[in-house]
Amino acid sequence: MPDFRTFAPFATVNAVEIRLSPEESHHLVTVNRCGRGDPVIAFDGQGGEWVTECVDASRSATVLRVKSARPAAPRVYEITLGQALPKGSTMDDIIRQATEVGVTRIIPLLSERTQVHLDGERQDKKLEKWRTAAIEAAKQCGNPWLPEIAPIQSLASFIPTAAGYDLKLIASLHAGATTLKSALAHHGARHGAAPKKVLWLVGPEGDFSPAELTAALTAGFQPITLGPLVLRSDTAAIYALSILSYELQSR
């Protein structure tokens, strides 16, 4: 597979050539040093990929000639991450790594113990930054699918709308929580198949409040333990997402 990958969200199925945006042109030509005649894989983030050749290595308007289209196989499962916002730039890392393990959707959440507070303009800038992080991660790992990154919302408003999932899981430090392995096995035994749509909910530093945990359990979330150690929010997110992705691919 060529080293060069570029994001082309407006490429069409039967495209003969693909013209890149100024941002993608700059990244491909100036940053990655792609030149005329180099092979490039273009992807649209929705499972579409094109094998191309760079025919105009303009730093602001690169042109790629399409040699063939190769759409990815449909995804057989979906994993959604509901992540209470952590401090600092940790969410950027979560976005990148979640993209690498193939998460379908990421929902940034404000919880009672969330220490990050963003106004409207700052929220928009954060969303744009996170979407850029997802694109860069997809380029690096070869993922043809970009996760949907939803607008920031409160946990209280999200929980009642979290319907339509086969399995809803919440990270828990409390007694009585089950393991991911047990939750998946129980679902398989009960329904005769692996879940197709899974939601993984992770709290911020300090975890969810007792009231939030109670609300989630009342809404049908299963409390999940990740072992005897207390994990950081970002570690808990990616640890479980990696296991879920591996297990669902294997079934």
Image: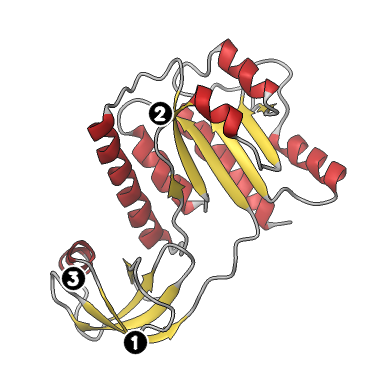
Could you say where residue 15 lies in the image, as x and y percent from the top left? 37, 83
Q: Secondary structure at mark 2?
A: loop
Could you say where residue 81 lies in the image, as x and y percent from the top left? 53, 39
- The N terminus sits in image quarter: bottom left
Q: Secondary structure at mark 1?
A: loop
Residue under label 2, please give it: 85
Q: Residues within 10 Å of mark 1 (few under 14, many from 20)?
A: some
**Residue pictured at 28% horizontal, 44% vertical:** 129
Of mark 1 and mark 2, the one earlier in the sequence is 1
**Residue pictured at 66% horizontal, 42% vertical:** 165
Q: Secondary structure at mark 3?
A: helix
Q: Is residue 153 visible?
A: yes
The residues bearing labels 2 and 3 have C-alpha atoms spaced at a distance of 34 Å
**Residue pictured at 58% horizontal, 12% vertical:** 211
Residue under label 3, please give it: 29
Of mark 3 and mark 1, the one earlier in the sequence is 1
Residue under label 1, please give it: 16
Could you say where residue 37 lies in the image, as x and y percent from the top left? 24, 86
Could you say where residue 75 lies in the image, as x and y percent from the top left? 60, 61
Marks 3, 1: nearer the viewer: 1
